[in-house]
Amino acid sequence: MSEPAAAPVPRGELTVRTIAMPADTNANGDIFGGWVMSRMDQAGGIAGVERAQGRVVTVKVDSMTFIAPVKVGDVLEVFTEVESIGRTSMKIHIEAWARRFRGHGRDKVTDATFTFVAVDDAGRPRPVPAQ
């Protein structure tokens, strides 16, 4: 007999948790994809600021495919992991998971790699400090 497959687990560190509310839905009652993407950008910004030790801006989002809908009452959990660091930029892998309101399960909603650039107070690129 084979062992049951392990449940998938999020990659990275839990960075943002928020609840999906009725005001965030489309006409079908699903949470807007843009709302999910905005929470992912927030989480990436938090991770980027921590790593860059200062202000960062989003410059690119790699391909994003929505795997499962988010419903009202679900708790959206966003996980981040710094993948690579250049001189002024960094790529951060971001995953969004929905902790289901009634089912108690957790489903991966989407993931993408966001690129952030560290900037100074004038908005000009600056080096990401070495750790």
Image (spheres, rainbow, N blue to C red):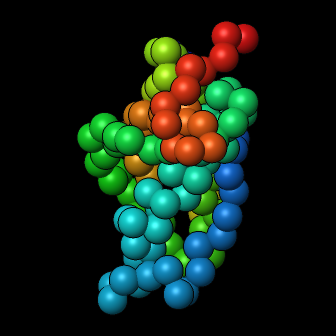
For the point 38% across and 41% down, the residue is 59
> Residue 115 or 27: which is nearer the viewer?
115
> Residue 35 or 59: which is nearer the viewer?
59
Asked if residue 56 is positioned above or below residue 23 in the image, the reply reads above
In the rendered image, is residue 42 in sight? yes
For the point 27% across and 40% down, the residue is 63
> Residue 6 or 22: which is nearer the viewer?
22
Asked if residue 45 is positioned above or below residue 70 in the image, the reply reads above
Provide residue 11's location: percent of width, then percent of height: 57, 30
Provide residue 47's location: percent of width, then percent of height: 65, 36
Q: In which quarter of the image is residue 10?
A: top right
For the point 55% across and 36% down, the residue is 119
> Residue 82 or 117: which is nearer the viewer?
117
Numbered disc total = 0
Provide residue 33's location: percent of width, then percent of height: 38, 65
Q: Would you say 87 lies left or right of 34 here?
A: right
Q: Would you say 47 lies left or right of 117 here?
A: right
Asked if residue 67 is positioned above or below residue 87 in the image, the reply reads below
In the rendered image, is residue 9 in sight? no
For the point 47% across and 15% down, the residue is 86
Asked if residue 8 is positioned above or below residue 23 in the image, the reply reads above
Provide residue 61's location: percent of width, then percent of height: 35, 42
Which quarter of the figure is the C terminus placed in? top right
Q: In which quarter of the image is residue 62?
A: top left
Q: Would you say 78 lies left or right of 25 here?
A: right
Q: In which quarter of the image is residue 74?
A: bottom right
